[in-house]
Image (cartoon, rainbow, N blue to C red):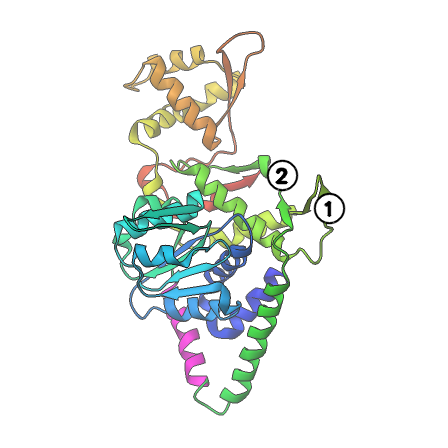
Amino acid sequence: MTIRDIKEDLIGLGLGGNVDLATLLYLSLTMRKAERKISMLITGPSSAGKSYLADTVINLFPQEDIIKVSRVTPAALVKYGDLSRKVLFVYEKFKDELFAQYIRGLISEGEVIHATANELCRLQGPTTLVETTANPNIIGIENKSRCFVVGINTSEEARSNILERQKELRTIRAFPLNKETEDTQRGHKEFQENLDPTIDVIIPYAKRIKLHTLAQHAPRILERVLNVITAIGFLEQGKREVKELNGHRYIEAEETDFYIAKEILQKLPIDETESILPEDTVKFIETLRAHRNKLYELGTFTRGHLFDIINKSDYPHRSSKVVIKHLSVLNQIGFIDERPVRGLKNRCEYTLNKAFTVLLTQRSPQNCYATLSLT
């Protein structure tokens, strides 16, 4: 089953106005069987179709793999024991700091230990989390950095797709439509049950992927991108050669998987606005951009070259420690490429990345995934 097949089925189920969001959710639920998870927080006003979308996609999966709750206490959560291949779906997210802490532990650490005076409970992960909420203000920055936070499409077209299907299901067309829905659900459940979780997905071109954005959480954002590529490849395991190395069975992601992932992600209103770099780092980047012609002319430059530029500019922080800190961050997010100078200890040379699209402070869009590139 390909992404195109999945999208066609989702459109047929009335999700045409939110087909990319529904596809990302489908990929998220697919990864419940794998080690690398994709978690999602779906936001939008009441009656916008969040629950309809989530339920429609979830019904394509084996229900024994889904734990659906409206509210669960941390003490009750740990009683589930093993959630490593489950989906925890919380409709209408609630504010509970301890619950949020446990969820972070499940997603990041893969385990939560809950100790009381009478017992010690272990909750096994990592776990796929899906939450919906009409109140985005209760989503903390820590959860944002671990999940895709996606707004549902509230346009007239998206609402009319759902309304038209609801009305059609009250006509004589309901009988064949319900039969088609049941057949679609059955086909996807069988497909999902036949996916082999022991087959890993290797991304041969992973080092060539660049995220040209000014996000503090760029490593985590990039990790989620890699997981989406992995999910797309995972769906194709029946059509690709299964290789083996040292007892590990794997298939290789193709470059087309990267472009499919980028197409899905850049179309969605994904909230990364809380991950913008600090103002002093942004100011440093603006200083470099103002002198980019000089840096391009040099080709490869040193810290000495940078200090010459800084001393002639209005950049306020001229400490070598501050500059080195900024250079380290810019190397991580792909703004510059850093190389050690052979034979000279603690000396580095830098190259300004011409492909880097500058997205600064208030000019930064919510979706940073359009800046992905395969170098």
Magenta stretch: helix, strand or loop mostly: helix
At a point 34% along the width and 30% down the height, the residue shown is: 282
Query: What residue would you read off at disc 2?
Result: 205
Number of marks drawn: 2
- Residue 160 is left or right of residue 85, and the answer is left
Q: Identify the image quadrant of the C terminus.
A: top right
Residue visible at 51% across and 42% down in the picture? 372
Q: Quadrant of residue 187?
A: bottom right
The stretch drawn in magenta includes residue 156:
yes
Q: Decide: is 211 above or below 118.
A: above
Asked if residue 42 is positioned above or below residue 303 in the image, the reply reads below
Name the residue at 38% across, 12% down.
307
**The residue stretch that appears in magenta:** 153-168
Left or right of 33, for residue 105: left
Label disc, if present, on residue 243 of the rendered structure:
1
Q: Is residue 56 above or below residue 151?
A: below
Q: Position of residue 163 (x, y in %)?
A: 40, 78
Check disc 2 and report its element: helix, strand or loop: loop
Inspect the image, locate mark 2, and give the three-letter code of the amino acid beneath it. Tyr
